[in-house]
Each structure stands twice: as structure tokens, then as C-alpha cells.
Image: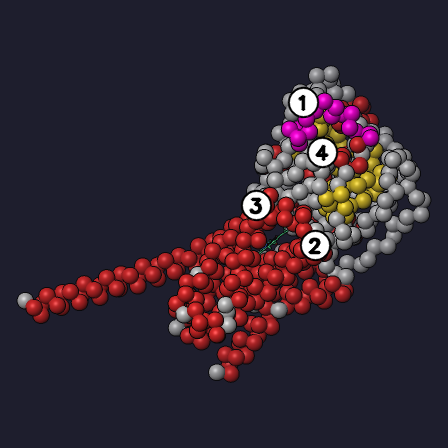
Amino acid sequence: MLIRRAPDIRYSEVTPKALYMRRREFMQAAAVAAAGAAAALSPAGSRHVHAQNGRTKLPNVRKSQFSTTEKLNSYEDITSYNNYYEFGTDKDDPERNAHRLVTRPWTIRVEGLVKTPATYDIDTLIKPYAFEERIYRLRCVEAWSMVIPWIGFPLADVIKRLEPLPSARFIQFTTLADAKQMLGIRVPVLDWPYVEGLRMDEAMHPLAILAVGLYGEVLPNQNGAPIRLVVPWKYGFKSIKSIVRIRFTDTMPRTSWPVANAREYGFYSNVNPTVDHPRWSQATERRLGEFFRRKTVMFNGYGDQVAHLYSGMDLRRYY
Amino acid sequence: MTGFRIFRWSIFASALVPAAALVYWTFTGDLGANPIEFITHTTGTTALSLLVITLTITPLRRVTARNELIRLRRMLGLLAFFYACLHMLTWVVLDWFFDVASMTADVVKRPFITMGMMTFVLLVPLAATSTAGMIRRLGRRWQQLHRLIYVAAVTAVIHFWWVEKADFRQPRLWALALCVLFGFRVWWSLQTRAARTRDAFTFLKDGMLRRG
Ligand code: HEM
């Protein structure tokens, strides 16, 4: 289970970006041009070359016993195939649009049931923590998965230093919602800002981390820069991106996806092959880069570590 | 008529561009991080586009009074069916690799898959009876049978709607397009009926006048 990762995986092979960024526009245009109705569908105009994210290396990154030894997905896959609706709902929208996000200066408001509510500058907040590499499986609710080398530190360490009150039972996170930087906000696909949350014992689990990097480098914007949550035993949407607010509460946070559709999404959203999403089976998944589907594993394969958090709970009911 | 023939060929060629692009990008490795999803979406969107475009031909023909446009209709319908086949085969071969049990479960349990399958099943008899021989043999019934294309367009849009998780802008646009196209037809058939009533009325009046 907890095996150290093989030491010889290299980060560097990143294929240069080609015309694939334009594919979707092209396909739409082609389909429509077939009847000369081009104007209807393809929103011309806002097409810009994706700005280079400063690809800065993060220093002194330690390995972690929690990392998997599975084959990593490429940097290109991880940074070009994202669900980050604030930048658009197509998978390649975030890569195209997230360069508008300004990640410094960045502050995080800490509030609610906590000893001293305060607004922290991100660099002050993360300064005390040593960076670790955590190679985790990520299982999206849409039945695809990746293996991603995150850089971060345990959420538990941060929570301890923030000193929540004993009455705090949940932690709630909020993503930035700034229509000037995030084009997708103008479209009411979700009730902005994006909100996620964990029960305190889930948040204190050593597998839950705050990530600031990827592949040894500063986190790209489309992956949730400057700081995001990673909870590998839950569906990907629980791992909220670009956090601006942390709130400790005694009631279960009203998180974005259950608010949008309570029948299809629950608060816990643990990876669970036996509870289907109404619109697709969760029994299998496609690991990006592989042809055949593979079986989805309970708690995304982290059951040995996290199953005890849910002992006695009916996970069909609390999905 | 050569001008029209060139027009027709160029429409045919451009309708094949999405398929050609998929083949090309398969070889250049440019289908993105999730090629199967990309192929599914491309073939699905193209099938729906061509289906709706097929439905525009008759209204266009009436508005422009250019009867030769009718010669595009079968070609476009068959192209839509071609992409629907590619789309369905992507699902069968690439997505599930002939895992019949899982596919059957999906058709039964997942409403969006049920709708997709229904659309496909509706299109099959239309494609099968698209030959000149069939048109002749079926006569009036051919017309009636081919009204199924309206049903297929509706189920295709519902299928697309149910595919989406939160962003319904595209299916909404397609639904709107269908409303406009159907609205045109309803309006037109009401006109025809009104004209017929008027004719009947005139006929009666004339008869009475003559008798009186
Ligand atoms: C055997 C029947 C069919 C099956 C199994 C099927 C299956 C699928 C699947 C799996 C998706 C992708 C869902 C996702 O991304 O989560 C999809 C999308 C779609 N399908 Fe189908 N489908 C079928 C028939 C059709 C037909 C006949 C049409 C149109 C005439 C159609 C139009 C579409 C469209 C427009 C999309 C959305 C593409 C996008 O999101 O860009 N499908 N279908």
C-alpha cells in the first residue's frame, strides 16, 4: 500500500503545445461550415495564445510515503484537461483562459469558529511548512482518472496553527469569483462562488493536503493556483481550487455541486464504485492514457487509510 | 446546373472535414488528453448539426423558391447518419470495447444513453429507405415514415441536454433552432389550411350565387 515512489521518474518531457488548442473551435466551425451557418455557433473573437505560466521550480521538496508508484500522467495532460468552470466548461478552456488569473498578491480570509479570524497573505500562511511531493490518483466524478505529482503540505498542519474552536465540526473553502479574471463567472452554470467543505476529521486526515505545486514546479493557474485542496479519496470536484476563504463552522457547508443538483451529488462524494451517479456508472474509470477501462476502487484505493472515518455510516445514503 | 453541382460537392466535402480531421489527429497524436471523449463529442456534435441542417432544407427551399435545394436533403441526412454511426461505434468499440453487459446496463439505466440509442434507432429506417427505389415503392408511406426525422431531432437534443452536467447553453441553442424550424412548419401548415378553407368557402358561395 504505502510504497515509496520509484526515484527515476523525470519531469521534463513536456511536448510543446501545438495547434491542438484550436481543435474544438475548428471542429465546431467545420461542422457548421458544412451548411454555411458558421456565425451561429463558434464564438469568434476571444482567442489568444496561452500565456506562459512562469514555470518556476519549487525548492527543497521532500518525498512522501503516501505517494503511489503508478505511472504519472504527463504534465501536458494534467495542465490541458481541467474542470475549472470559472474559466469555462470545456476541458481545454482553463488552459486557454486561466492566464488572466493574478496569483500574487493573494490573501486568504480565515473566519468562523476560529480563535482569531484574520486575513493572511498567502506567502505568510504557507511559510512554516516544508513542501512534500504527493503522487496521488485523482478520480473525477466523470469516470476518468489521472496520477498527479502534487507539491504541498498537510492541511492538518495548517488547521492546527489556525486554532479552530472545539465547536468547529466542518471546514468550508471558497474559490475566488472575480468576473474580470474569470470569464466563466459571467455564465451562471453554478451558483458562484464555488464552495467546498470537509468534516473536521476528514480535513485533519494526513492524506488531505493543500497543494501549491505540480511536477516540482509552481502550480499552473488552470490547476488551481496559487493554492488548492487535494483530497485523493474523494471525487475531484471536492478538491477545490484557488482558495480565498476558509471558514470553520458547526453546520455542514452547502457545497456547490449538491446545491446545483442534490440528487446527483452529495456532500461526502467519496469515490465509491457501488454507488452510481444517476447518469453514469461509477464502477469503472478510464485512466487517461490507457485504452481499456479499469475497475474503480473504493475510496480511490485509499480505503486502508480512510475507511475508518466512515465506519457505521451508510455510504449509499451519505454519497 | 454545374454551379449547383459544385455547390453540392463542396457541401459534401466540408461535411467530411470533421471525420478527416479526426483521422489526421489520430495519426499526429493530437486528440488531446482524452481522445475517446474528444471523438465522441466531435462525432455527436457533427451528427446533430447535420441533422438540424437537413431540417432547414425544406424551409430554405420555400423561402428561396429554389427547388433544386431538395437535392441536398438526402445527402445531408445520410451524412448525419454517417456521423451518428461513427458516434455509436466510438461508444461500442473505443469506450466499452464490446462489453455488451455494461453497454446494455447503460442503455437501460442511463436516460441520456437511452435517448441516444433511441435517436440512432429512429435514424436507421430513414437511412435504409433513402434510395430512389424505396421512395417509389413506399409512395405516400415514405413521406409519413420520414416524418420520424422530427422525432429524431427532438430526441437528439434531449440526449445532448442530458449529457450536460451544468452548462446547458449549447443544447438550449439547439432546442431553440428546432423551435424555429418547427414553428415555420406549423405556421406554413396553418396557412395552407386557411387557404383551403377560403377556397372551400369561395366554392360554396359561387355555387349559391349561381343557383340563386
Ligand atoms: C447509440 C446511440 C448513442 C450513444 C450510446 C451515445 C452516447 C453518447 C455519449 C457517451 C456521449 C458523451 C457523454 C459525455 O461526455 O459524458 C454523447 C454525447 C453526445 N451525443 Fe450521443 N450517443 C448516441 C447517439 C447519438 C445520436 C444519434 C446523436 C445525434 C444525432 C448524438 C448526439 C450527441 C451529442 C450532440 C453529444 C454531445 C457532444 C458534446 O458534448 O460536445 N448521440 N453521446
Please give the range of residues in magenta.
Answer: A304-319
Q: Nearer the viewer, mark 1 or mark 4?
A: 4
- Give the residue number, with chain letter if any, for mark 1: A249
| Quadrant observed for ligand 1 in the rendered image | bottom right
From the viewer's perspective, is A121 left or right of B20?
A: right
Name the amino acid type tagged 4: Asn
**Comparing marks 1 and 3, which lies closer to the viewer?**
3
The three-letter code of the residue at mark 3 reads Pro
Label 2, label 3: how far apart the Cα atoms are: 20 Å
Q: Distance between the residues labelled 1 and 2?
A: 49 Å
Contact, mark 2 vs mark 3 (Cβ under 8 Å):
no
User: Is residue A310 within the magenta segment?
Assistant: yes
- Earlier-in-chain disc, 1 versus 4: 1
Dot 1 alpha-carbon crowd within 10 angstroms: few under 14, some 14 to 19, many 20 or more: many
Q: Position of residue A267 (x, y in %)?
A: 66, 31
Which chain letter matches label 3?
A: B
- Between B35 and B137, the residue placed more toward the observer is B137
- Which residue does the image show at 60% across and 48% down from the upper left? B107
Which residue is found at the position 52% from the left and 79% from the top? B5
**Mark 2 or mark 3: which comes first in sequence?**
2
Kindly report the distance in space between the C-alpha atoms of the residues bearing marks 4 and 2: 29 Å
Label at residue A270: 4
- Identify the disc placed on residue B111: 3
In the image, residue B139 above or below residue A282 = below
The answer to whether dots 4 and 2 both sit on one chain is: no
